[in-house]
């Protein structure tokens, strides 16, 4: 199995690199910008011609949520045009695409876990671009898996978990938003699931929700990090309005993962279980 991983320097791509030795029958090509620019279709085409890939895992994305409000062209180039380029080349070269999307395609007004077929309505431009990327993939290709995930963190790269630990080193107290509700997701769990699906030979293509099980606010998440790390810094809950940002965030983006668990017969770990594993690896 020949697998191209784009955006391999990010959190998910790094976790795929960490896991590669567990999958000795796979031949990985790990690529990242600027060596591989998914907005440059000619360059991509050369890579596909030479690579003879069976699968592409697209981890490349513009993820600066607040910056995207003013930098829409760059955001669209990566999240929409880049996704379109990959999907069209996957179609041309008969490659199965795994594409990563986000809970930010929803507006946050729901009060119960969101299913794949529920109406989307992003509240920020990052969410708009990721939704448009999904649509480009689905329009161009039949052999695809789209995974919407949320609140991704990892042993690699910059993320919320590492930021909270670092802030606690110099602060006696932190104010953390308590009215945005979602599900933290350990990138290694998602990476493992993708590779297991490839191993299984599944052709159950389509759109899936994947995040760790359970529900949390950013305040809950921070409290758990400090509890497991035995950090004494106090955590105070605050409403979103006390911490304004250029881009709005959905207040509720908990996703229903039952379709994934049923189709792939795979239980997704609870976020607290996975957080402990990540902290042990840091």
Image (spheres, helix red, strand yellow):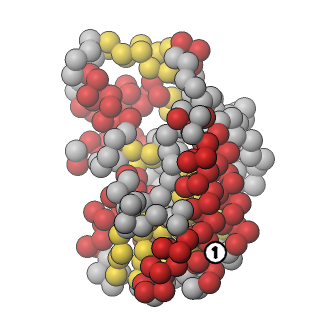
Q: In this view, does 8 lie above or below 54?
A: above
Quadrant, the C terminus = top left
Q: Is residue 149 above or below residue 93?
A: above
Q: Can residue 259 be seen in this view?
A: no
Q: Is residue 178 above or below residue 115?
A: above
Quadrant, the N terminus = bottom left
Could you say whether the residue bearing mark 1 is in a helix, strand or loop? helix
> How many labels, in total?
1
Q: In screen coordinates, is 1 left or right of 205?
A: left
Q: Residue at x 38, y 35 (%)?
A: 160
Classify mark 1: residues with Cα within 10 Å, few (<14), some (14-19) or many (20+).
some
Give residue 22's position: percent from left, percent from top: 28, 73
Nearest the viewer among 158 and 79 is: 79
Q: In this view, does 49 lie above or below 191?
A: below
Q: Residue at x 30, y 49 (%)?
A: 156
Q: In screen coordinates, is 91 left or right of 189?
A: right
Nearest the viewer among 109 and 248 is: 248
Q: Residue at x 62, y 84 (%)?
A: 92
Give residue 207's position: percent from left, percent from top: 65, 62
Q: Is residue 161 visible?
A: yes
Give the residue furthest to the right.
119
Q: Which residue is drawn at 39% across and 44% down?
A: 153
Give residue 52's position: percent from left, percent from top: 45, 87
Q: For residue 143, what is the image quadrant?
A: bottom right
Give residue 234's position: percent from left, percent from top: 32, 14
Tag 1 residue: 88
């Amino acid at each position: 199995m020949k697998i191209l991983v784009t955006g391999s320097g990010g959190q998910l791509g790094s976790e795929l690199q960490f896991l590669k030795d567990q999958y000795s029958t796979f031949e990985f090509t790990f690529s990242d910008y600027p060596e591989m620019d998914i907005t440059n279709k000619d360059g991509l085409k050369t890579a596909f011609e030479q690579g003879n890939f069976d699968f592409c895992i697209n981890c490349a994305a513009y993820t600066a949520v607040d910056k995207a409000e003013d930098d829409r062209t760059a955001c669209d180039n990566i999240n929409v045009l880049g996704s379109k380029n990959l999907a069209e080349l996957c179609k041309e070269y008969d490659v199965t695409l795994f594409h990563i999307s986000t809970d930010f395609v929803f507006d946050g007004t729901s009060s119960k876990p969101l299913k794949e077929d529920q109406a989307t309505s992003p509240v920020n431009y990052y969410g708009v671009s990721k939704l448009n990327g999904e649509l480009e993939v689905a329009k161009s290709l039949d052999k695809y898996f789209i995974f919407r995930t949320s609140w991704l963190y990892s042993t690699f790269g910059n993320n919320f978990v590492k930021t909270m630990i670092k802030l606690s080193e110099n602060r006696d107290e932190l104010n953390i938003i308590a009215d945005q509700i979602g599900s933290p997701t350990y990138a290694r769990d998602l990476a493992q699931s993708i590779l297991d699906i490839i191993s299984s030979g599944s052709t159950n293509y389509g759109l899936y929700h994947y995040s760790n099980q359970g529900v949390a606010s950013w305040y809950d998440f921070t409290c758990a990090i400090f509890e497991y790390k035995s950090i004494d810094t106090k955590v105070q809950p605050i409403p979103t309005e006390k911490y304004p940002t250029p881009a709005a965030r959905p207040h509720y983006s908990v996703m229903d993962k039952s379709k994934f668990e049923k189709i792939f017969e795979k239980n997704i770990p609870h976020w607290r279980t996975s957080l402990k594993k990540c902290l042990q690896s840091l």
